[in-house]
Amino acid sequence: MKLNKNLPADLCILICFLANMVFSQDISPWADPTSTGRSQPVYIVDATINGTQIDISNDWIGIFDDSLIVGKDRISSLPASDPIVVFLEYTPPGSDPLPGAREGYPMLFRIWEKSSGQVLDATIAEVISGTAEFSEGGIVAVTLSATKPSHINFDEHADKLSQGFRLYPNYPNPFNPCTTVRFYVGRPSRVKVAVFNVQGSTVSSLMDVYMAKGEYEIMWDGLSDDGKRMGAGMYIIRMQADHYIQTRKVLLVQ
């Protein structure tokens, strides 16, 4: 059963389909970093997800200063023969500052696994060369490791779920402009599904109704309750039914 909010069902499904087509192309989920004229090379020696080397033909690696993307690339080989170029902040004479990595701040890494559409935080397993801090001209080489949580297969675990509730990973994720939220109601209950920003404020109340047992879908079109288009960033989808509460992180991209 599918539930929709704000956009007509056929239109939202079409938009999501087209968005999927976009993400199937050779693009990353992150915006291009600002080219500031100040840079630092970062070499990826190895990168794994759950102990398995990433798909070098599809997966992307992003480098961040806090939440700011300062470098990204799809690695063509491991160890990488070419570095990911990181751009450092710079203020041209008589001009506004150009955003970039701050000198001396730690590097944060994320991996976009294209096959699942998930953005995963990556830890530095080993620093092979240099220091994993931003510094103009400093050469850094690292190995990365990310962990992807296992997901429940609904068909294989239907019996176990029959008395419970589940909020499944939304799809696509990252997304633009809309994403599908799928959940399971184990017994007749009042179900609330809402979207929150990272500060904990409600962005969109997707539903608050009494529902029969079953599996459902609802789409979030990236709009707030008052119809405003939300900015790119991380949001939290929260499902509550009886005493059950579960959340999922979603990434809205431009």
Image: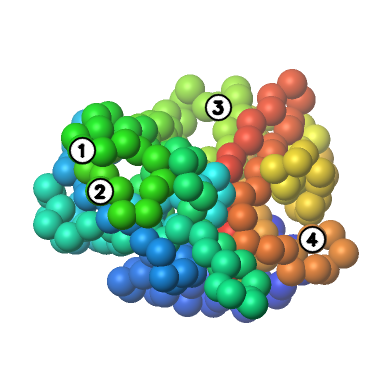
In the rendered structure, which disc, 1 or 3, sits on the residue that comes first in sequence? 1
Q: Amino acid at mark 2?
A: Ile
| x and y percentages locating residue 113 in the rendered image | 33, 51
Position of the C terminus, as image quadrant, is bottom right
Residue 234's place in the image compared with 131, above or below, is below
The answer to whether mark 4 and mark 1 are in CB contact below 8 A is no
In the rendered structure, which disc, 1 or 2, sits on the residue that comes first in sequence? 1
User: Crowdedness of circle 2 by 10 Å Cα count: few (<14), some, many (20+)?
Assistant: some
Q: Amino acid at mark 3?
A: Ser
Q: Amino acid at mark 4?
A: Ser
Q: Residue at x 54, y 45 (%)?
A: 66
User: Mark 4 or mark 1: which is in front?
Assistant: 1
User: Mark 3 or mark 2: which is in front?
Assistant: 2
In the rendered structure, which disc, 4 or 1, sits on the residue that comes first in sequence? 1
Q: In the displayed structure, does residue 109 sit left or right of residue 241?
A: left
Report helix, strand or loop for mark 3: loop
User: Crowdedness of circle 4 by 10 Å Cα count: few (<14), some, many (20+)?
Assistant: some
| x and y percentages locating residue 49 in the rendered image | 28, 38
Front one among 240 and 19: 19
Determine which residue is flagged by label 1. 129
User: Mark 4 or mark 2: which is in front?
Assistant: 2
Q: Residue at x 13, y 49 (%)?
A: 78
The answer to whether residue 144 is visible is: yes
Determine which residue is flagged by label 2. 139
